[in-house]
Image: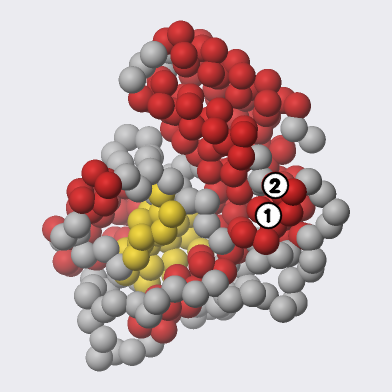
Amino acid sequence: MTSAAAPCVLLVEDDTSITRFVAMALDQLPIELLTCTSVPAAVALLEQRDIQLVITDLMLPGESGISLVQRLSANPQLRGGTLVAVFSAGLTTAVKEQLQGMNLWRVLSKPIAVQELESCVRDALALHALPEVDTNTAKPSPQHSPTNPAAKPAPATNTAETLAIATHFGGDAQLFTTYRAACLKQFAADVQAGDAAAQAQDWPALRRLAHSLATVLLTLGRPQDSLVARALEDAAAVADTAACSSGWSDLRQRLATLN
C-alpha cells in the first residue's frame, strides 16, 4: 500500500522467495518497498532515492551485506539519515562481533515473523517522524510480537506447518497458503540453479542457494528439509565435493516432492 509521498524502504536480498515474504508481510504498510539483489545496486538506489530504512541480507552475490554496512558506516553522506537493519540467518557470534561499531540500528534473524518485520518498519517510520532524534544512534523500544486478531486461523494440517503459521504468519493461514504456493513455483527455478551450480562445482553459488532454502523451508514448516539445506550450506562452505553432491541430490529430491 503506497502513495506518491510514501517513505521508501530498501530490501537488499537475492532470494526471490524471501523477497516475496517480505513484500507480503509489509503489503499493508504505507511505504514504497524497493528491492535489489546486490551491494552496487543498493548503493545506486541510496544515491538516487531518499530511503528511510535499509534491510540487508549478509550473504549476497559478489560483495557481502557486511560490505554494504561498512560503506554506509564509513560514508555519512551516502547514509544520511537512513536506518540500517541486518537481516540474516547467519548471525553467529563471530558475525555479530564483526558488525559491532557499524552503526547498525537493528538486527533481524531469519526466519522472521510477519509481526516483527512490521514492527521494525513501523519503528523506523516513527523515528523519522521525530526530527529531533538522531536516527543513526537512536535505540528502538523492546520488540514485541502482538497477535493479529483479524488473522485467519490455521487450517487442519501437520503440526510443523501449524507451528509455522502461528510463528511466522501471525496465525494467518491464508497468507501462509499464498506464500507457500509462490515458493512451490520458485522451487523449480531453484532446482535448475542448484543443478547448474553442482555441475559446475560452483560451491559459493550452491552455498548461497542452500542458505536461502534453509530459511524458506523452515518458514514453510519443513524443519527436516531445512536441516538438509543447512548441512549442504556447511559442506559448500568448505568445498566438500562429495558432501555437496550427495547433499544437493537429497535436497533436490525433497524440493521436487513438495506439493
- Position of residue 245 measured from the top left corner of the image (x, y, whole percent): 51, 12
Q: Quick one: quadrant of the C terminus?
A: top right
- Does residue 33 appear anywhere in the picture? yes
Q: Is residue 258 above or below residue 199?
A: below
Callout 2 amino acid: Ala
Say which quarter of the image contains residue 87: bottom left
Q: Is residue 191 left or right of residue 124?
A: right
- Between 216 and 163, the residue placed more toward the observer is 163
Residue lying furthest right: 156
Mark number, residue 92: none
Can you identify the residue that label 1 sits on? 163
148 lies left or right of 19: right
Q: Amino acid at mark 1?
A: Leu
The x and y percentages for residue 86 are 36, 56
Residue at 41% from the left image edge and 59% from the top image edge:
108
Q: Residue at x 29, y 39 (%)?
A: 63
Which image quarter is the N terminus in? bottom right
Residue at position x 68%, y 54% from top?
163
* Residue 256 against residue 224 in the figure, above or below: above
In the foreground, 33 or 4: 33
Report the disc number at residue 160.
2
Which x, y percent locates residue 191? 62, 25
